[in-house]
Image: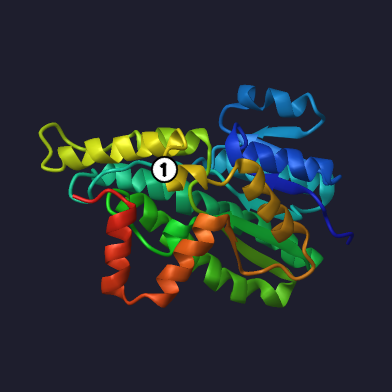
Amino acid sequence: MAISRAVLITGCSSGIGRATALLLHREGLPVYASARDTDALAPLAQLGIKTLRLDVTDEESASAAVKQIAEEHGAVGALVNNAGTGVHGAVEDVPLDTARALFETNLFGAVRLTQLVLPGMREQGAGRIVFLSSVLGRFSPPGGGLYQATKHAVEAYGDALRLEVAQFGVRVALIEPATVRTRFFETAMMQFAGRPGSAYQHFYDELAAWAIEVHEGKSTAGRYAATPEQVAQAIRRAVLAESPKARYPVGTLARGALSMRRLLPDAAFDKFVARQFPAP
């Protein structure tokens, strides 16, 4: 069978997903941009990009999206697991239902889509699966432990998957940006799961002020934040490279933070994190 070049991208209503859809469309690939809200995809559809309604937490919509692409191209050639959500709060404060919802979107949604596309990729003997992870999948500052746990899980899943499917010609890559100038950062950082009268309220106030400084470019993290287009370029390389890397750190902040994580012992790295991020 002919090898499919069709790319399915989740979470394309804005930010990284939209930038990736535009970039891969310009590369001449058949792009299927998906999101829960198809109205938000209208600007992409006007450019000739195919759009799909896909809620990664909904089995029926995920199956329907993969089935449509398989009917039109034989298989999904590349899957970009970009859809995600986030919430911040001290680990003690985050309700379990909120934590479960984070994992349903950020991990299990990607897991299910991966399971759905793999049979077609195995049959054609080729495929690419790309996960939008984060440098926070490699270390975990205070205030985001549950969100960051989803990214640690994605890293572990991607590492195992990469070795399991290599025999079938399927390649797996993890994209690891630090701060990215998107609405996701703005909304996730300002959405706290704290309870009224929380013992961590002062910490939340500091975290909100820090997030505003980053968003406005008034801090180092803000000045060196990556753009969605930079992340999209890393995804492009992961999709198109003959031999993609296992990981693509994106931007100066990501490379610097990961270097510090490798070089410093835990106690020293904890001090580094406490200087760079608000801490209770």
Q: For the point 33% across and 34% down, which residue is it?
A: 191
Q: In this view, does 170 lie above or below 66?
A: below
Q: Nearer the viewer, residue 254 or 93?
A: 254
Image side of residue 100 versus residue 243, left or right: left
Q: Nearer the viewer, residue 84 or 4?
A: 84
| Residue 140, visible in the rendered structure | yes
Which quarter of the rendering shows the N terminus? bottom right
Residue 163 location, x and y as percent?
60, 76
Q: In this view, does 104 lie above or below 201?
A: below
Image side of residue 145 versus residue 184, left or right: left
Name the secondary structure under disc 1: loop
Q: Which residue is labeled 1 in the image?
A: 219
Q: Which of 170 and 220 is in front in this view?
A: 220
Residue 278 location, x and y as percent?
27, 48
Colour setup of the view: rainbow
Q: For the point 42% across and 57% down, which residue is it?
A: 136
